[in-house]
Image (cartoon, rainbow, N blue to C red):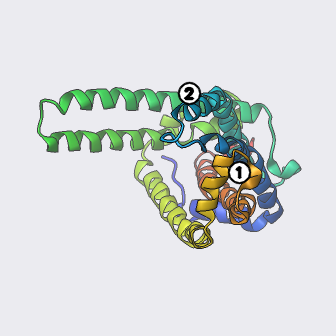
Amino acid sequence: MADFSMEKALGSGFRVITRNPAAIGVWAVFYLVVGLGPSMLLMPGLGHPMSADPQAAFTAISKMMVWMPFLWILSLAHAAIAYGAVYRAVLTPEDGRYFYLRLSRQELWLGLTLLVMLVLFVAFTGVAAIIIGVLSRSVPGVVTFLAIVGALAVVVWLALRLSMAGLMAFTERRFVLMESWTLTQGLGWKLFGVAFCQVVIILALELVVLLPTMLVLGLTGAFKGLAEAAKAGHPLAYPLPVIAAYLIVLPIFGALMYAILGGPWASIYQQIDGPRAEAA
């Protein structure tokens, strides 16, 4: 049975950051343009208070819904390109062209695999919710609670066992799903440990970076100004602190998250399936 070092895996994302500061800067710009840009442009559409003018609010929301399919596709492409860059930085660090950002067959297969996994998880969650909803009408509350916990545990377990599918699709340039099940056999608890540590790291970074940013925005009255800008319907009317947060803090934080979230899983794949990983 293949095995991996949790310490090496968790340090992988931070090594990507320290070894490629220029790439992190470019990834931050990519996050700003592709990740934050569309939502920031659509945000003024939410500025009509429902109580003041329900018809105007409904019209604005309807116009925004037209763009939702485009935003979903863009989000999928965003994830495939961003995490493809992280995977490339870990698996083939010498291939640093375009700061590891590409739109190639590797990203397309990665995106397809992520899409199928998302559909499967949404379908499973929906079925589980219906079953639990029916059971809750005829069983004690504690049984319903245990059923919810059990369903969440199954979702986490499935996600961990299929966690290598995207990396395998990326490196092998084909659709991959159940092959990940075989590759991760016997590694469930260690994979869970990595995921748990990532959650702790992200929470710590949010406390260090995002919480102070939110406090500054609150103290400067930026949130009130943001609501007024939304009513005005023009993004250029956003308060300066909000614009600074969107242009500087959030993109850098997003780029760091790419590396911290994606790096460990690429390292795990490299350790447990080295020959194919290096062939990427």
Q: Residue at x 28, y 45 (%)?
A: 149
- Quadrant (top left, top right, bottom left, bottom right) of the C terminus: top right
| 28 up-or-down from 34: above or below | below
Counting every numbered tag in the picture gives 2
Counting other residues with Cα less than 10 Å from the Cα at mark 1, is it few (<14), some (14-19), or many (20 or more)?
many
Please tell me which residue lies in front, 100 or 252.
Answer: 252
Q: Residue furthest right?
A: 97
Residue type beneath disc 2: Val
Which quadrant holds residue 74?
A: top right
**128 displayed left or right of 32:** left
Please tell me which residue lies in front, 92 or 124.
Answer: 124
| 72 up-or-down from 13: above or below | above
In the rendered image, is residue 7 in sight?
yes
Tag 2's secondary structure?
A: helix
Residue beneath disc 2: 116
Tag 1's secondary structure?
A: helix
How far apart are the alpha carbons under marks 2 and 1?
21 Å
Which quadrant holds residue 38?
A: top right
Residue beneath disc 1: 86
Counting other residues with Cα less than 10 Å from the Cα at mark 2, is it few (<14), some (14-19), or many (20 or more)?
some
Q: Could you say where residue 133 lies in the image, as x and y percent from the top left?
A: 25, 30
Q: Could you say where residue 136 lies in the image, as x and y percent from the top left?
A: 19, 33
Residue type beneath disc 1: Val
**N-terminal-most mark, 2 or 1:** 1
Q: Residue at x 54, y 56 (%)?
A: 4
Please tell me which residue lies in front, 102 or 235.
Answer: 235
| 209 up-or-down from 67: above or below | below
Q: Could you say where residue 226 lies in the image, as x and y percent from the top left?
A: 63, 56
